[in-house]
Amino acid sequence: MANQIRVCVLGVGLAGLTFHVPFVLALPHIFRLHSVLERNPQTPGGKLHERFGVSVRIHQAFTQVLQDDEIDLIVVATPNDTHYPFAKAALEAGKHVLVDKPVTTTAAQARELGLLAKEKNLVLYAFQNRRWDSDFLALQRLLTLPSSSPHSLGTITEFESHYDRYRTTLKGTWKDAAGQTYDLGSHLIDQALVLFGRPQRLTAFVQNVRGIGSPEVDDAFTILFHYDANEARSQPLTVILRAHILSVRSQQLRFVVRGTQGTFTKYGLDIQEDQLKEMPTPSAILGHSYGKEPESIWGTLENLATDGVVQTVWPSTSAGCYIELYKNLGASIRGEATTSVKWEEATEVIEMIELVHKSSLERVTVAVP
């Protein structure tokens, strides 16, 4: 197909085969999966063929990827500490780059990559896919209601966002080695910044609550963003971001949002990840049921009314749609759109994570520059 963007996916583990390959294959009018990086394929066609029955070129060394002139876009879906060197080398080789989160391990690295992409006039995109979670889309819709709406929360005074799980052992993956603040915190921080912008101060508690693995690698965190009242915000706001690895619940808490006129509560996680893991064919992404949250985990509203508090369901009417990120990526590379996830925003997430670790280590509230 003419004008397809030729893609090489670095890494054929969970990230590559679950969050990237399916979307590339589901959008043949935009992308063509040209190749993957798999250092030691155990079968003909490697893990990609085992999972999807698709055969593409397999590069067994990153240098081969960089030297392949047919590749337009490199997707970095490898361990966190390789994101910066792989993305930098790809940009230097003249390739557009999509980097899985967290984009780098330091903000200085992220800023350097951003400058390099501008210098080379290349698209550098961060995979902050959870902006397209169904419940986050529902929450954004709620927060844009006029104050006159009976469902309006009014002025938001406290926003609580969770990504809790129950897991007593290490999975033994590189994601465990990275720690939960980088792995899950990057999503929660990004969503908070999208909704409320940069806080004035933050306080953080980063822990290894299970006491297993390296004590330096966190498995739980609580992060507080402090926003002062100002011309745009009539009352102070506290944002609470939490991930706990020993949370025993039948449905994990996702959001609690408190305002002057009501409260929004939501349990359960977006279903796209589970669907992608079990998906028999990438075309199922385009199906009617993809990304649609069951009504049993829709959020609830409690609003003030003349006769007391009224409780209603706030539906997740928009299906989760990570594919929109890939559509925007393709349009950005073709010069038809600007990136929905700005690299400066991804850099800001890493800046916040660095301040989170500083706050926790020094046991202080830190100012956000």
Image (cartoon, rainbow, N blue to C red):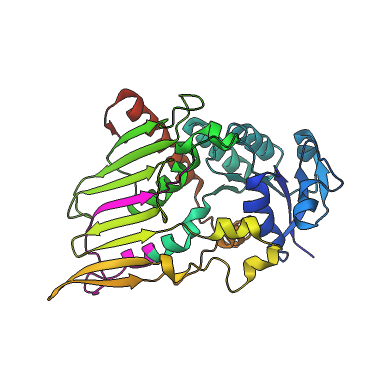
Question: Is residue 302 in sight in this rendering?
Answer: yes
Q: Residue at x 56, y 37 (%)?
A: 175
**Compared to 267, does 294 lie above or below?**
below
* Residue 330 screen position, x and y as percent: 64, 58
Q: Residue at x 34, y 29 (%)?
A: 360
Q: Is residue 315 left or right of residue 256?
A: right
What quarter of the picture does the N terminus occupy? bottom right
Residue 49 vs residue 238, the one in the foreground: 49
Residue 151 highlighted magenta (yes or no): yes
Q: How many marks?
A: 0
What quarter of the picture does the C terminus occupy? top left
* Residue 124 screen position, x and y as percent: 59, 46
* Residue 164 screen position, x and y as percent: 42, 46
Quarter of the figure with residue 366:
top left
Q: Residue at x 58, y 44 (%)?
A: 100
Toward the left, the furthest residue is 306
Residue 249 vs residue 286, the one in the foreground: 249
Q: Is residue 231 left or right of residue 56?
A: left
Question: Is residue 97 in sight in this rendering?
Answer: no
* Residue 148 screen position, x and y as percent: 21, 74
Quarter of the figure with residue 367:
top left
**Compared to 310, does 8 lie above or below?**
above
From which residue to which does the magenta span run?
A: 139-166
**Compared to 134, does 204 lie above or below?**
above
Residue 366 highlighted magenta (yes or no): no
Toward the right, the furthest residue is 44
